[in-house]
Image (spheres, rainbow, N blue to C red):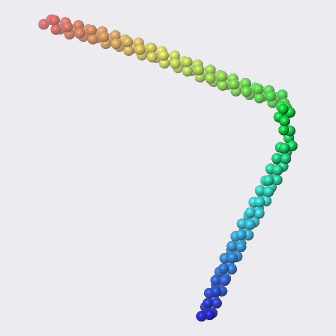
Amino acid sequence: MAERRMGAVLQMVDQNHRMAEEGHHRLRTDWRALERRVESLEAARVAADVRFTKIESTPGDVTKLQFPARFVAALCVICVGYGAGNYAISARLEANMMKAIEQQQAAFKELKNRVELSQIEMNTFKENLLRDLAGVRRQP
């Protein structure tokens, strides 16, 4: 019985030892991954420090900045071109809208004339019908 207990205790100790080794292995793996990540972050920080140092060393006064004449001319041409394009598009849209409005007004006038003609024709037909009916009633 003591041997059985000793065997069970040894088995538990062995199992605990394996679990501890597996845990140790996972910790080591995680530790190495963290070290690699810290190294990459450190390299990125150093690169950012270099960039910030370079930015800090540039002149802070914007009035001292000078642009080449070609750059200024190109910028002006681009702005004028953009404005001219917008003006042309808006003028074309306005012309199209005016044309559409005129067409609608013409169509409305034509429809109004047709309605008036229809009313005249209906009134004429009604008068003729009433005359015919009045004539039919008088003849007997």
Residue at 26 percent across and 8 percent down: it is 128
* Outermost front residue: 61
Question: Eyeballing the image, is 8 above or below 30?
Answer: below
Query: 108 left or right of 87?
Result: left
Query: 111 left or right of 55?
Result: left
Quadrant for the C terminus, please.
top left
Q: Nearer the viewer, residue 50 or 33?
A: 50
Residue at 38 percent across and 15 percent down: it is 115
Query: 93 left or right of 36?
Result: left
* Outermost left residue: 140
Quadrant for the N terminus, please.
bottom right
Count of numbered circles in the view = 0
Residue at 58 percent across and 19 percent down: it is 95
Question: Eyeballing the image, is 78 above or below 109?
Answer: below
Question: Eyeballing the image, is 116 above or below 16?
Answer: above
Residue at 64 percent across and 85 percent down: it is 11
Q: Nearer the viewer, residue 88 or 23?
A: 23
Q: Nearer the viewer, residue 4 or 131?
A: 4
Name the image quarter holding residue 7.
Answer: bottom right
Q: In the rendering, at what x and y percent does residue 103 appear?
A: 50, 17
Q: In the rendering, at what x and y percent does residue 5 appear?
A: 61, 90
Question: Eyeballing the image, is 5 above or below 102?
Answer: below
Q: In the rendering, at what x and y percent does residue 28 appear?
A: 73, 69
